[in-house]
Image (tube, rainbow, N blue to C red):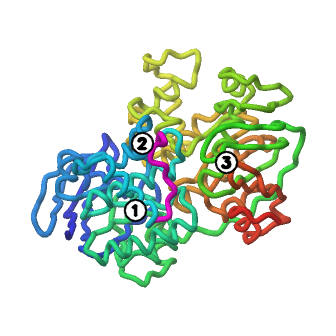
Amino acid sequence: MDVEFQHISKRFGSVQALSDVSLTAKQGTIHGLIGENGAGKSTLMKILTGYQAKSGGDILINGEKIALKTPDDAAQIGIGMLYQEPMDFPHLTVLENFSLGCPVLSRERFAASLKHLAFAFGFQLAPKRRVELLTVGERQQIELLRLIHCETSVLILDEPTTGISPAQKALLFPALKKLATEGMTILLVSHKLEEVASLCDEVTVLRHGNVTHHTYAPFRFPELLEAMFGAVPEQKEKPVARATGNAVLTMNNIQAGGERQGLELKNFSAKSGEIIGLAGLDGAGQATFLRLAAGLTIPEQGDMQLFSTKLPTSKKASRIAGKLQTVFLPADRLEEALFTDISLSEHFSLRDPKSSFWQKTETNRQRAAEAIKTFSIKGQYDDTADNLSGGNQQRLLLALLDPQSKLILLENPTRGLDIRSGQWVWEYLTQTLSPEACIIFSSPELDEILHYSDRILVFYDGDIVLNSLTAETDHGSVAAAMTGMRS
């Protein structure tokens, strides 16, 4: 199906998210939609799926105007979207989520279809496993397979490669091209220009809610970057290693459940001032490690210390960690970190223990307004978190973070962010927060880990297979360790 947007506009209160946007995605092609965070890309796609109402303009399918009032309206004509934040039911199983919204089949036929598609894409998904136990990347995989199984005609992918391994990308990309040659219309929202260049037939660039550029393959990166940002972002030099001090986190003889293999760790120590990057394939143990350090996961065996204080093996661990100036920013911002239906000012009310949650005080409005200005959040103090783009949600999380924190745990801190927004996050972490803070972060992007880390831990099947100073290793060694090859 050909999809045409004619003069689409969208306003959220005083914020003009889209202004007079027109573009056409042709059947049998992959059309890239790129732009900095908050440019309006996800908003435009949510309008196409009936998730949000447009303020003006028309949508045409094969030349005919259509009205999309609900997601069901879009699904009925074959429009499906893989959202950047998982839109699933965490308490249901993989198979139950896979079968939602599709024509009714027997459980056996659903299971067979899931097995066939998972094998074709190289995804490892256990049908009976509850989705709440999976990583963000695995949850995206379920939704992608569900949309393909439901015979979607217009497939919208919002940052589809976030959280999947290079090997899975190598299977995914040819599959998407094959779907396009078979007649599917694919709209790809991404900030990764290399992926756009390898997949897309044409690209439209949005900036501040306006179309600033449209071109066909092959693409010129400087041209696209200038259309996205107004100028080509300069490359940042690797940060100078910071001075280290006493141990802030130690783990000894740890065994813990979680992800595919759980986690086994003989000993580990992190010092103040260190920046430690965690690498590994999705589900290899990084998520469990971060949640152990935050006191959110309780070890089955072993002991942990934060700032020389032993953490109890109970639910009190997370409260003690918080009192010891430890913060954790998860990858799934809306499910684990923010509240979708409350305003930015109410988030600041929650952060202040002296303020009533339900009382919209002028103080909290002022705090939110100051954060919006300081952190360049595109929104208003009375906007809800789910109305912000992924990049602006990340900026809100950093604004809520206690600047006096001494141990900062980050799960994929630049997930779904464009180049400039990602650089801004790291400038804030390394230049604004205390240089004595220990930062431990995971990322699927090796370049990010190698650029910002002082030390790298590589996880494989619940075990740390490489623990090395960044200056003493390289991209090839880290990549090899991720596949289980020990030096």
The answer to whether residue 124 is magenta is yes
User: Alpha-carbon distance for marks 3 and 1?
Assistant: 28 Å
Q: Residue at position x 75%, y 27% from top?
A: 324
Secondary structure beneath label 2: loop
Residue annotated with mark 3: 286
Q: Main secondary structure of the magenta part?
A: loop
| Residue with the mark numbered 2 | 379
Q: Secondary structure at mark 1?
A: helix
Alpha carbon distance from label 2 to label 1: 43 Å
Badge 1: residue crowd in 10 Å (few <14, some 14–19, many ≥20)? few
Q: Nearer the viewer, residue 15 or 391?
A: 391
Circle 3 packing at 10 Å, graded few (<14), some (14-19), many (20+), is many
Query: Which of pointers 3 and 2 indicates the residue nearer the eye?
Result: 3
Q: List x then y, in percent, for residue 13.
A: 31, 40
Q: Looking at numbered disc 2 in the image, what kind of residue is underneath it?
A: Gly
Whole-percent x, y for residue 241 in the image: 83, 56
Type of the residue with mark 3: Gln
* Image quarter (top left, top right, bottom left or bottom right) of the C terminus: bottom right
Amino acid on which disc 1 is placed: His
Of residue 414 and residue 142, the one placed in the foreground of this image is 142
Span highlighted in magenta in the image? 121-131
Residue positioned 65% across, 69% down in the render = 235
Residue 468: name its quadrant.
bottom right
Q: Position of residue 446 (x, y in %)?
A: 66, 63
Kind of element beneath mark 3: helix
Q: Residue at x 28, y 69 (%)?
A: 185
Task: Specify few, some or many for label 2: CA neighbours under 10 Å numbering under 14, 14-19, or 20 or more.
Answer: many
| Res. 207 image quadrant | bottom left
- Would you name the residue on which mark 1 appears? 116
